Each structure stands twice: as C-alpha cells, then as structure tokens.
Image (cartoon, rainbow, N blue to C red):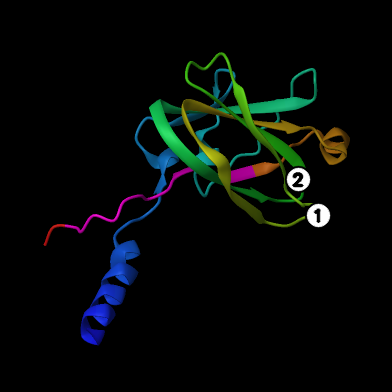
Amino acid sequence: MRKFLLLMCAFLGSVGAWAQDTNLCIASGVTAKIGETDYSNVLNETGAQPNNYDTNGEMNIVVNLGSSKTIDGFSITFSGDRWVSEFTLSYSTDGSSYTKIADYSTGISSNTTTTIAQAFASQVTAQYIKYTSKKSNKNDADGYSETIKNFQLIQYATGTTVPPT
C-alpha cells in the first residue's frame, strides 16, 4: 500500500510537468494597435514606447487575438525612465463595446523594470483586450510615455490528462 501511495504522489506531482500555461499573444496574427497604428512590439521583448494620448490624457492599446479566447490573466513588463502608476484592462468580443476587468496599480515610481502579472478575478472570453493608462506628470513634462514590453495574455493550463506515450 505504501508503495502505491508513493507512486500516486509521484504521478500527481508530475502532472504539471506537461501542462503549461499559454501566452495567447504569441500566436500568428495577433496584433496590438493604437487606433490604426501598429504597436505589436509591445507583445515581445523589443517593446515600444507609444506616445498616443487622447484628449482625456489616456492611451488605449488594443490587443486583437484574432478570435475569441478564454483568458485567465496577464503579464506586462514596464521599463525605462517613464512609468505608469495605474492602468485598466477591459475586454470585448466585438472590438466596440468593452467591459472593465479591473484597475491595476504598478507601484512604479522611478526608473526601473517591473513586471506586473496577475490572474483575473474570473476568467473572460474575448477577442479584444484593451490596456488603458493615464498620462503621468513625467509624461506631461517630456512628452513621452512608458515603455511596454512582453504584454502577455495568459490561458492557464487545465486538466490532468496523461499525455500519450
């Protein structure tokens, strides 16, 4: 019996070895835009420093996943000497009507590289995710915005099916 329990523990412990979370932003055809301008570099290590604030002092980056996906959370890396202290994520199935997921605080107040990663309070199904940040005093002073890179939308691994041998 003890041997059986040890084998079961080893099996259950290895389940996570083949179940991996998926970054939905690296799929072919995924785009990130501000209006009609492509800012897809925010989706990778290169990053982008968009400076497209609207008259309300907000910048909206819309990630189009190409089709509806189930999304469990996100990860965004902010870098450089310009920063955002708060941002909002919203989702949409049609790209027109958005529902707020939540407001987030970065805790950034200086020249640093910071990654914010968090699960959503509940899973969302959407084709579009909108990132909205407010212009900070630093942005007003020099006219630049935060550098955003490695924007990821995460679909958590589920299930415990045994992979084929």
Q: Which mark is residue 110?
A: 1
Q: Position of residue 159 (x, y in %)?
A: 31, 51
47 on left or right of 66: right
The answer to whether residue 102 shows anywhere in this view is yes
Q: Please rate how many residues cluster around mark 2, counting C-alpha atoms within 10 Å: few if below 14, some from 14 to 19, many from 20.
A: many
Q: Please rate how many residues cluster around mark 1, counting C-alpha atoms within 10 Å: few if below 14, some from 14 to 19, many from 20.
A: few
Identify which amino acid the numbered label 2 is placed on. Trp
Residue farthest toward the front in the current orientation of the protein: 1
Front-lying residue, 137 or 162: 162
Q: Which mark is residue 83?
A: 2
Q: Position of residue 51 (x, y in %)?
A: 70, 30
State which region is magenta. 148-163
Q: Is residue 149 above or below residue 19?
A: above
Q: Position of residue 22 (x, y in %)?
A: 39, 47
Residue at 60% x, 23% y is: 99
Identify which amino acid the numbered label 1 is placed on. Ser
Residue at 59% x, 18% y is: 35
Q: Is residue 99 above or below residue 163?
A: above
Query: Quadrant location of residue 162?
Result: bottom left
The answer to whether residue 152 shows anywhere in this view is no
Of pointers 1 and 2, the one earlier in the residue sequence: 2
